[in-house]
Amino acid sequence: MKFDMPEEPVKEIATSTSKVYKSKLNALSTRGFDSVKKLQEEPEKVIDAIKEITGTDDDEKARHARRTILSAIFWVAAMPKKNAYHTFWQKNIPLNVVGGEHDGEKWVKKSRYTG
């Protein structure tokens, strides 16, 4: 089953990124979430499906996979600023910084970052 893509996604992204996001949305569609409307109406059930897809581990790989699926959702579905997906995103921030002068250091939320 394929995800029913909207004519105009919420954001413009690169073609290569859209291919990745479409594959993530198609994975959700196999679990019954095949439209933007269903993503908007049943976020808690969608989040449960994301957990099924990515597993129960709380390592960097699982967190990255969850954020990729969430990014795909944000690409196609307009959401209010405060929503269950945003809350789930905040629970899946990276564990460590990758690259740059802070490579390997523990990730700090933007609101707590002091430079």
Image: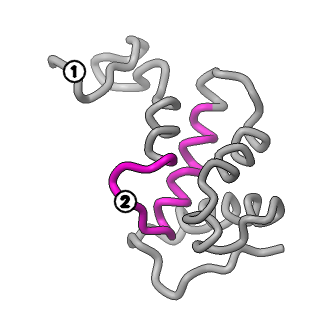
Q: Which secondary structure lies at badge 2?
A: loop
Residue located beneath label 1 in the image: 113
Task: Specify whether residue 27 is painted magenta.
Answer: no
Quarter of the figure with the C terminus? top left
Magenta: main secondary structure? helix
| Residue at x 32%, y 25% (from the top left corner) | 109
Residue 91 picture location, percent across and down: 50, 29
In the image, residue 40 above or below residue 1: above
Residue 17 picture location, percent across and down: 53, 62
Q: How many residues crowd mark 2 within 10 Å: few (<14), some (14–19), many (20+)?
A: few
| Residue at x 50%, y 46% (from the top left corner) | 84
Residue segment shown in magenta: 63-85
Residue located beneath label 2 in the image: 80
Q: How many residues crowd mark 1 within 10 Å: few (<14), some (14–19), many (20+)?
A: few
| Residue at x 55%, y 82% (from the top left corner) | 6
Residue 74 picture location, percent across and down: 47, 60
